[in-house]
């Protein structure tokens, strides 16, 4: 497992503040002071919900002016470890736009529990690849739009590590790349350090 440690947790609570909370986490990790409530105020639409593009523009301005950092929008056509490792290996989490469906969350929770006791990683990799092939088609519903962080990868098991802004229990969860790509909206952001 290769993953970024010590990313600040910002718990969005029951609010639909996944984008402001996730951007705050990335900014604080990059050493730029931030507050999800202020970010939410700057980028909340009239009827509720966050305008992620507007939020990104505000964050890009703030990171340049306060920390000399760069916030960039990136395409995520593939989530395979060899495509995301250039950010993770530098210590830069990826703010990933995806659909947080109940089926996906069940898979992520179960997979994370199971992998704590894995002894034979080759056998585990084979089993989860077969499971992911069955799960992926069931996860492709475009609903429950969400943003969270990709903070790691495992090239042997073809998994990515994901962190949600829902508190300590969601600091790190693991999913197979095929399952992640099934719920991906193919885009995201990075706040470079």
Image: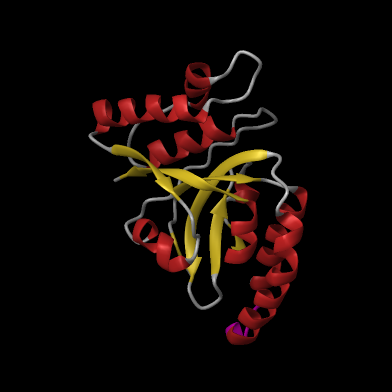
Q: Is residue 10 above or below residue 150?
A: above
User: Which residue corresponds to the image point at 22% horizontal and 34% vertical from the top-left?
Assistant: 68
x, y percentage for residue 180?
60, 58
Above or below: residue 155 compared with residue 108? below
Looking at this rendering, what residue extends furthest in the left direction?
68
Left of 64 or right of it: where is 52? right
Which residue corresponds to the image point at 39% horizontal and 63% vertical from the top-left? 85
Q: Identify which residue, 165 or 145, lies in the foreground.
A: 145
In-front residue for pair 192/2 = 192
Location of residue 27 in the rendering, given as x and y in whole percent from the top left corner: 39, 36
Q: Magenta stretch?
A: 117-121
Q: Is residue 17 left or right of residue 155?
A: right
Q: How is the image coloured?
A: secondary structure
Residue drawn at point x = 31 percent, y = 31 percent = 63
Left or right of 154, for residue 57: left
**Main SS of the magenta segment?**
loop
Residue 115 colored magenta?
Answer: no
**Residue 149 at what x, y percent from top left?**
51, 48
**Visible residue check, residue 176:** no
Q: Quadrant of residue 83?
A: bottom left
**Left or right: residue 166 compared with residue 192:** right
| Residue 77 picture location, percent across and down | 49, 55
* Residue at left offset 59%, top offset 83%: 121
Q: Is residue 25 visible?
A: yes
- Quadrant of residue 47 in the image? top right
């Amino acid at each position: 497992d290769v993953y970024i440690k010590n990313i600040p947790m910002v718990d969005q609570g029951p609010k639909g503040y996944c984008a402001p909370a996730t951007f705050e986490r990335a900014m604080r990790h990059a050493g730029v002071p931030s507050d999800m409530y202020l970010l939410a105020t700057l980028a909340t639409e009239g009827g509720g919900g966050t305008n992620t593009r507007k939020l990104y523009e505000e964050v890009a301005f703030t990171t340049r002016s306060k920390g000399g950092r760069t916030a960039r929008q990136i395409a995520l056509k593939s989530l395979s470890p060899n495509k995301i490792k250039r950010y993770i290996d530098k210590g830069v989490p990826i703010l990933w736009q995806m659909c947080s469906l109940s089926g996906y969350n069940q898979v992520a929770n179960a997979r994370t529990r199971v992998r704590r006791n894995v002894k034979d990683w080759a056998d585990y990799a084979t089993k989860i690849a077969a499971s992911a092939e069955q799960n992926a088609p069931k996860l492709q519903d475009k609903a429950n739009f969400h943003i969270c962080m990709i903070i790691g990868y495992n090239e042997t098991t073809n998994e990515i590590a994901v962190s949600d802004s829902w508190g300590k229990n969601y600091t790190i969860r693991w999913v197979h790349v095929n399952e992640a790509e099934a719920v991906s909206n193919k885009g995201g952001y990075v706040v470079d350090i």
